Image (spheres, rainbow, N blue to C red):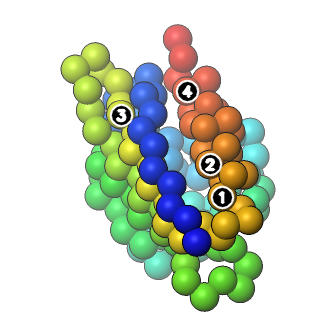
Amino acid sequence: MKDFKKYYRVPAEPDILYQALTNANTIRLWTGEEAIMEEIPGTIFSLWDGSITGINIEFAPSQKIVQHWDFGDQETPSVVTIKLHPDKKGLTSLEITQTNIPDEDFENIANGWTDIYISSLIDFYKE
């Protein structure tokens, strides 16, 4: 199992970005795919029309999201923590940490964070 951690700069303020990550309708706008999301711990979520699924664990509005992501019948959940840090320019430093990624999935997951997930957010908020 491997862990992933990376920081990204997204051109939106933390409260706006937080809504984009927790509101199913907004998620559909920036992903272009169906999404199921409720800002309630213990609920099931689904992103990119089921490509990413799991359970919501914790929410701290405009600051943090914690989720368990599914990898089939894996015993130890993969925990994703998204932290939003404001910066002086009105942007957000987005800290992504994901633990317990199966070795065989690590490269795809790491690339997916940058090339799909984060790039979609950045494109959505570009002026």
Labelled disc at residue 52 = none
Query: Which residue is found at the position 58% from the left and 72% from the top?
Result: 1
Labelled disc at residue 106 = 1
The single residue placed furthest to the left in the displayed view is 88
The residue indicated by pointer 3 is 93
Q: Amino acid at mark 3?
A: Ser
The residue indicated by pointer 2 is 110
Query: Which residue is found at the position 30% from the left and 21% from the top?
Result: 90
Please say if 16 is above or below 44.
above
Q: Amino acid at mark 1?
A: Phe
Q: Secondary structure at mark 2?
A: helix
Percent x, y of residue 14: 33, 36
Query: Nearer the observer, disc 1 or disc 4?
Result: 1
Earlier-in-chain disc, 3 versus 1: 3
Q: Secondary structure at mark 3?
A: strand
Q: Secondary structure at mark 4?
A: helix
